[in-house]
Amino acid sequence: MEQSSFPKCCKCAKGDLVPLSDFGSQGSSIHYKAWVCTNPDCGYNLKIRNGDVYIDEPIMSGANNVRSRHNM
């Protein structure tokens, strides 16, 4: 049996919850800003935004945020 160092997802119990980090508006790193299930069929997530915790928000593709070189 494979052992994981991450907690199991409380929604699907199949995936693991893995931490994600981000950068703040001033460029400083924010560790563990979100926890997301590794099971792509599940999508469970916890996010911290401005000190508030958001649970199971819709996950959007980052491809929508990519700007083309012509718009720079």
Image (cartoon, rainbow, N blue to C red):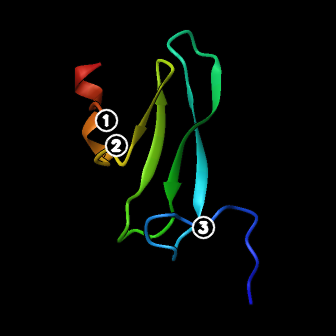
Question: Who is closer to the viewer here, 21 or 5?
Answer: 5
Residue located 51% across and 63% down the image: 10
Kind of residue at disc 3: Lys
Dot 3 lies on which element?
Answer: loop
Residue 34, relative to residue 22: is it above or below?
Answer: below
Task: Indicate whether 13 appears above or below 49.
Answer: below
Q: CA distance from mark 3 to mark 1?
A: 32 Å
Callout 2 touching callout 1 (CB < 8 Å): yes
Residue 13, percent across and down? 51, 74
Residue closer to the observer: 42 or 71: 42
Rounded to the nearest angstrom, the CA distance separating label 2 from label 1 is 7 Å
Q: Amino acid at mark 1?
A: Val
Classify 10 Å Cα crowding around label 1: few (below 14), some (14-19), many (20 and above): few
Q: Quadrant of the N terminus?
A: bottom right
Q: Is residue 27 left or right of residue 69?
A: right
Q: Please report the residue visible at 28 percent of the width from the left and 30 percent of the height from the top.
A: 67
Circle on res. 66? 1
Which circle's residue, 3 or 1, is located before the other in the chain?
3
In the foreground, 13 or 72: 13
- Say what amino acid the circle numbered 2 marks: Gly
Q: Which label belongs to residue 62? A: 2
Number of the label disc, if any, that sits on residue 8? 3
